[in-house]
Image (cartoon, grey):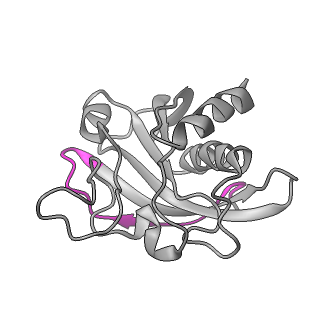
Amino acid sequence: MTQHLLEHERIGTGLKGAVAHRVRHRSHDLHGRPTESSGLVIAPSEPVADRPVLSWCHGTTGLGDAACPSTQPDPAGDLRTYFEPGSTQQIDYGVPGAQDWIDAGGVVCATDYQGLGTPGMHQYSVNRTNAIDAITVVRAAQELPVGAGVRLGLPAACVGTARDWLTARLTV
């Protein structure tokens, strides 16, 4: 039994030289109550130990499960915005620079946040809980055979920026 990873499903990705997993993992809220969260883990195809990890803290996508980034079509890719020509979704999803990170040998993690794709209330404005999810998705990735190490990078956008700072604080 794993400590954080509850289930994973290998999914397709348009990224070159990459494998992707949709994951469901254990987490907790800011009060320490157990919860579940979902997200993505994307890694180079060739497993190598102790790869650096990028944990993407997405910005606002919506409040219902329809806004869950990991359930969008081909979610394991570079960022797609809803206003791009040819967009079929009404939310932004993906990870900016995902292909570059894979090409550099890193593992990409992207949390959906609690309640966005998993049971329970979405913790949209609870940045500390969202930051916890950004860490627990990395811990779940470390239980997959993708080589996720302990070096962590934290880019973010929009409201993700506040989560980013809190995540960094939680890892210290």
Quadrant of the image occupied by residue 98: top left
Quadrant of the image occupied by residue 170: top right
Is 103 magenta? The answer is: no
Q: Residue at x 48, y 48 (%)?
A: 59
In-front residue for pair 3/64: 64
Decide if residue 105 is on the left or right side of residue 28.
left
In-front residue for pair 133/122: 122
From this view, report whether residue 129 is shown above or below residue 114: above
Q: Residue at x 60, y 45 (%)?
A: 134
Q: Position of residue 6 (x, y in %)?
A: 63, 65
Q: Residue at x 33, y 60 (%)?
A: 75
Q: Position of residue 165 (x, y in %)?
A: 63, 29
Number of marks in the image?
A: 0
Which stretch is magenta? 2-18
Q: Position of residue 140 (x, y in %)?
A: 60, 51
Q: Position of residue 168 (x, y in %)?
A: 65, 28
Which quadrant, please, contains the C terminus?
top right
From this view, report whether residue 156 is shown above or below residue 24: above
From this view, report whether residue 82 is shown above or below residue 44: below
In-front residue for pair 51/114: 114
Which quadrant, please, contains the N terminus?
bottom right
Decide if residue 163 is on the left or right side of residue 157.
right
Is 16 magenta? The answer is: yes
Decide if residue 105 is on the left or right side of residue 153.
left
